[in-house]
Image: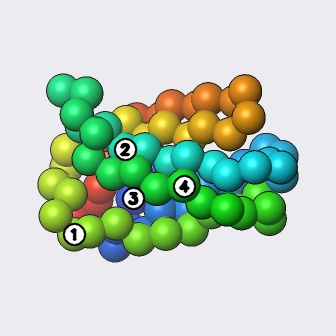
Amino acid sequence: FPNPIEHHQINIQLFERPAEGVDVTIYDMVGAKVYYNRFQNSSGLISFKVSDTFSRETHYILEVKYGSTVTREQVIFKK
């Protein structure tokens, strides 16, 4: 959240506190990986900023993986 993403700031609220790292990947609509990071976070909230090279008004897929949980959400960067 928020979606659309403003100021290239991404906040992810997890439903649980993972015991291990959280993999966050962003793909463009062609399926190419354009961002990846592994976060060591036990609080359940991940907050980070991505480069301003992400195109505004373009759709991306945000994927979050931890344990056996995989979630994908379509996101857009706001002007």
Q: How is the rendered protein coloured?
A: rainbow
Q: CA distance from mark 3 to mark 1?
A: 11 Å
Give the amino acid type for the residue marked by disc 1 in the picture: Asp
Question: Horizontally, is 6 left or right of 65 in the view?
Answer: left
- Give the camera-side residue of 29 and 65: 65
Front: mark 4 or 3: 4
CA gap between label 2 and label 4 equals: 12 Å
Q: Nearer the viewer, residue 14 or 18?
A: 18
Q: Which residue is mark 4?
A: 38
Residue 44 in the figure: left or right of residue 5: right
Which of marks 3 and 4 precedes in the sequence?
3
Residue that numbered label 1 is attached to: 52
Q: Which residue is mark 3?
A: 5
Instruction: Using the image as rendered, state which of residue 57 and residue 27 is in the foreground.
Output: 27
For label 1, the SS is loop
Q: Which circle's residue, 4 or 1, is located before the other in the chain?
A: 4
